[in-house]
Image (tube, rainbow, N blue to C red):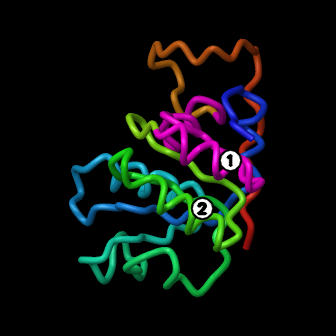
Amino acid sequence: MIVDDVAGLRRVLQGNRVIAVVGLSPTWNRPSYFAAKYMLEHGYTIIPVNPVATEILGQKCYPDLAAIPVKVDLVDVFRKPEDAMPIADEAIRLGAKCLWLQLGVINREAADKASAAGLDVVMDRCVKIEYARLFGGLNYAGVNTQVISAKRPPCPPLQV
């Protein structure tokens, strides 16, 4: 299912705590590094996927999704749109619950294939921005969150 609404994004972020980040850079000032670090600091398990690195953010890095020995809930894609289809195929094979294509990663065919296989699909959104927007991380920075409420929803519980 293509997820593009507040309730769906909340459900995806609350229900998927193990994130494989495909294309995670070991360089501290890259968007993938910043987003993964933020999610790691907010209780998510981050599994870096990068064929040229052995460790990123203190986590063992894997060359591809197939090499990951644990169950992955969400596959977060920081790659070119044309690379999304083989990653979607791997996410389906892994039994992931969600394929998340980051800002600028728009591949309708990959999204439709993953959705048809039963995965939730989020496209052209940043996992870090959406988490901050929906669970109170943007505070009073003047950002239009499109969520009108006098109270912030509770943060998802940490799973130990």
Quadrant in the rendering for residue 150: top right
How would you classify the magenta stretch by its main secondary structure?
helix
Task: Give x and y (percent) for residue 154.
Answer: 77, 39
Of residue 56 and residue 150, the one placed in the foreground of this image is 56
Tell me which segment is drawn in magenta: 107-135
The tag on residue 13 is 1
- Residue placed under numbered mark 2 in the picture: 44
Magenta stretch encompasses residue 132:
yes
Give the mark nearer the N terminus: 2 vs 1. Answer: 1
**Residue 23 figure quarter:** bottom left
Q: What element carries label 1?
A: helix
Task: Specify the quadrant of the image occupied by residue 106.
Answer: top left
42 drawn magenta: no
Say whether residue 5 is left or right of residue 46: right
The residue type indicated by label 1 comes to Leu
Q: Distance between the residues labelled 2 and 1?
A: 10 Å
Residue 78 horizontal/vertical position (percent): 38, 52
Could you tell me the amino acid type at mark 2? Tyr
